Amino acid sequence: MFKARMTHTEKSCLRLARVQNTCFGRGRNTVRLILAAIPFIVGCVIGLDTTVGILFIVSACFFYYKSSFMCDSVARNAFVQTPKQFLDVEYKLDVEFLRICSGGIEKRIGYRSLYALVSDKKYAYLFINKQQAYMIDFQTCSGGMEAFCNFLSSKTGLEWKVINIVERPSFID
């Protein structure tokens, strides 16, 4: 049996949202690109020698950049709206179930119902679908990170996807 925990902060919620967007946000990112391309193309057609053309191009660039932070605002709202007693989460992994205890409520999840296993250098993300995941701090895993990951892979039949999350500064907020 393995045990782990996670204490959520605004920063961890932002990280989880970015991981979700990196892994499963391809369609959303494609729509963003298309919506930004329309005013960009219009601006190019109107011409770079006109104020209107330049305004279309600048608005396209601003929209594309600013919309890349949509997942951040959703994560911040989720963090603010989450009651404080649910920010500390304990995980117990036994032979049959992943048990999640938060705010005095325990939930059992069968391993085969997990959708994806994702990790970065610090955390494991156990996705139950494309929009929802449990986040586990690797430093809190009893038995070690490697044994923990191998156990979950064997129980779920899923391979771990390892990603690199780059912290990026926001110049426009």
Image (cartoon, helix red, strand yellow):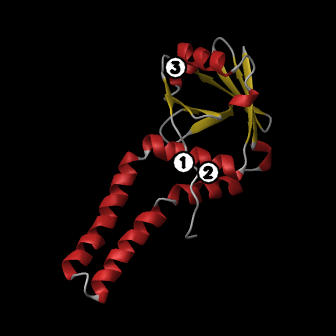
Inspect the image, locate mark 3, and give the three-letter code of the amino acid beneath it: Arg
Residue marked by disc 1: 18
Residue marked by disc 3: 112
Picture layout, residue 171 above or below residue 144: below
The residue drawn where x is 43% and y is 47% is: 25
Inspect the image, locate mark 2, and give the three-letter code of the amino acid beneath it: Leu
Q: How many marks?
A: 3
Q: Which badge, 3 or 2, is on the more N-terminal residue?
A: 2
The residue drawn where x is 70% and y is 57% is: 80
Inspect the image, locate mark 1, and give the three-letter code of the amino acid beneath it: Arg
Nearer mark to the viewer, of 3 and 1: 1
| Image position, residue 98 (x, y; %) | 65, 22
Outermost residue toward the front in this view:
49
What quarter of the picture does the C terminus occupy? Answer: bottom right
Q: Residues within 10 Å of mark 2 (few under 14, many from 20)?
A: many
Picture layout, residue 141 above or below residue 55: above
Residue marked by disc 2: 14
Picture layout, residue 126 above or below residue 30: above
